[in-house]
Amino acid sequence: MAELELVCVPTRILTDNDDIVDAIVEFGGHKIGPEDIVCVAESVVAITQGRFTRPEELNVCWQARLINRFIHPDGSMASIYGMQSAMNLDGKWKVLGAFILGAIAKIFRKPGVFYAIARAASLTDDVTGTMPPFDKHIVFGPKDPDKVAEKIVSRTGCYGAVVADVNDLKRSAVLGTSRGIDGNKIAQLLIDNPFGNDSQMTPIVIIKNYASVSGK
C-alpha cells in the first residue's frame, strides 16, 4: 500500500535569473509523479521573482523606527529595514494603523491582528531571514502564489502544488495552492519544516503518493 513520503529536492542557489517552475522541472522533474504534491518555499519563489532589496537602498521613516521599538527581536520585523520594506509595500499609514489596532487587540488577549492587517509585514523575511547570499537582503512575499502553483501542476503533471511558508518554530502556512488542494492539510504535513533553505539548498519538497493516501 502506498505511503506518504516527503522527498527533499536539492538545487543550486536560485536567484532572480531563474524561473522557479523551470528549476522544479530541472532538479525534481524525474521524481514527480501524478499522485504527488510539489511544495516550494515561499522565500525562494520570491527571490526568483526579483522581490528583494538591500537595507542600504531604503529610506527609513519615523513611523518604521517608532514601531520597531516594540517588535520582539526574534520577530520577522526585527529590524527597521524590514519594517520599512513592509511600509513600502502596504503603505506606512496602513502599517502604523495596523500596529495601533494590534496593540489594542492585545489588551483584550487577541494576538496576531497587526500581521493580519499588514500582510506585507507577515510575509517579509528580514535580513538573515533566508539563505545565503540573500541573507543580506530583505525578501518580500511572493507574487501570485496560486498562479505559481498552477504553473507547477501544468508543467510537471503532479496532482497538486503549493507555495509554503514554514519555519523551525512549528509555524507552517500555505500561501498559494493549485485548484482542489486543501492548504491547511498540506501545512500540517510540513509542520516539521522539511525544507532546507540554508546550506542544504533543498527549497523543494515532494509529498509522494498524496492522492492515493488521501483517498482522492
Image (cartoon, rainbow, N blue to C red):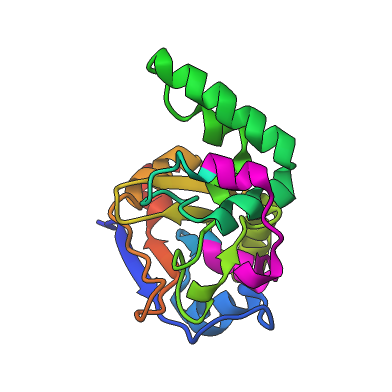
Along the viewing direction, whichever of 197 and 28 lies nearer the viewer: 197
Q: Is 49 placed left or right of 40 in the picture?
A: right
Along the viewing direction, whichever of 214 and 207 lies nearer the viewer: 207
Residue drawn 66% across and 69% down? 53
Q: Is 114 placed left or right of 20 in the picture?
A: left
Along the viewing direction, whichever of 135 and 32 lies nearer the viewer: 135
Residue drawn 52% across and 25% down? 102
Question: Which corner quadrant holds the C terminus?
Answer: top left
Q: Position of residue 46 (x, y in %)?
A: 62, 64
Q: Position of residue 109 (x, y in %)?
A: 37, 17
Vertical order, 67 against 139 (above or below): above
Q: Is 104 placed left or right of 146 in the picture?
A: left
Residue drawn 74% across and 42% down? 91
Question: Which corner quadrant holds the N terminus?
Answer: bottom left
Magenta stretch: includes residue 49: yes
Residue at the bottom extreme of this rendering? 12
- Magenta: main secondary structure: helix
Residue drawn 46% across and 30% down? 112
| The magenta segment | 43-67
Residue at the top extreme of this rendering? 108
Q: Position of residue 149 (x, y in %)?
A: 62, 57
